[in-house]
Amino acid sequence: MEAQSMYDSFNRRINYLRISVTDRCNLRCRYCMPAEGVQLLSHDEILRFDEIMEVVDIAVARGVDKIRITGGEPLVRKGVVELIAMIAKLEGVKDLGMTTNGLLLEQYAVALKEAGLMRVNISMDTTDPDRYREITRIGDISLLFRGIKAAVSAGLTPVKLNCVIKKTPEEPDAQLVKRFAEDNGLQVRFIHEMNLETGYFRPVIGGDGGDCKKCNRLRLTSNGIIKPCLFSSDGFSVRELGAAIALEKALRAKPKSGGVNSRDEFYNLGG
């Protein structure tokens, strides 16, 4: 049976679902969380895989054909390879990707590819080891380099590098990432550092995010809230409302453009 199509109130076709599978991360990036870390959700608050799949089943039946797994850091979620395999089996999913910091890809890249993951976006804000540790507070850039190599070798391509910038791609760290991408046949996307509370965001350079007039996405947080927009405080609980109703309410609540979000943080939204 052919899937339906979802359109929001502004006639944008919604076919993209971003799924945060955990609020936990093995880095402490300065633009994402404080040095001391954050108050993490309890195990019972995090959606089980069967709950995630209930949302995915309904979303795909209604025309979602692009799914991205995010976090936190999704590869710290136990069993995430099995979740990928479950999603990959669904007829109608044309694009199944993951956004990761890459530190665990050396370990998981082959298994992810075999499970059905198609491609990865890897966070990389510099190629300088000292600057990398400064930005991430605890990161070992050698693990990142090995993770990128493993992703390419496993065929999780095209590998795209997500580089956060303050103002411009001409910044020294961004230029280092650009040269690394060119030297290694990778793609790079420059993402302006955003602020949820002030509503500051700009279109992604080299990507599709941040362009409200073309926005085609909804988000599922790790604790089961369907968000109509990253820059909105609205959210609808799949546990309280049921997956179908929460999805419909989020679709109807999708704003024409981003505003402010005073309820959430990047580490629990998946960006």
Image: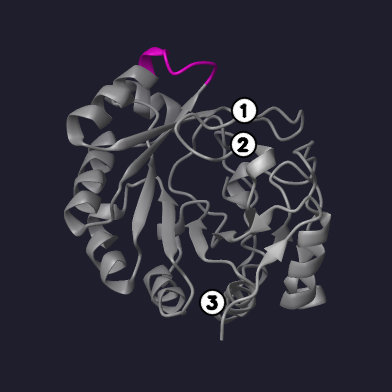
Q: Which residue is mark 2?
A: 210
Kind of residue at badge 1: Arg
CA gap between label 1 and label 2 equals: 6 Å
* Count of all numbered marks drawn on residues in the image: 3
Q: Which residues are magenta?
A: 166-173
- Residue under the image location 57 percent in, 27 percent down: 193
Q: Nearer the viewer, mark 2 or mark 3?
A: 2
In which image quadrant can residue 240 be found?
A: bottom right
Kind of residue at badge 3: Phe
Task: Pick whichever of labels 1 and 2 is earlier in the sequence.
Answer: 1
Q: Position of residue 228 (x, y in %)?
A: 73, 54
The secondary element bearing badge 2 is classed as loop
Q: Give the side of residue 184 with respect to residue 199, left or right.
A: left
In which image quadrant can residue 16 be found?
A: bottom right
In which image quadrant can residue 15 be found?
A: bottom right
**Nearest the camera: 196 or 46?**
196
Q: Quadrant of the C terminus?
A: top right
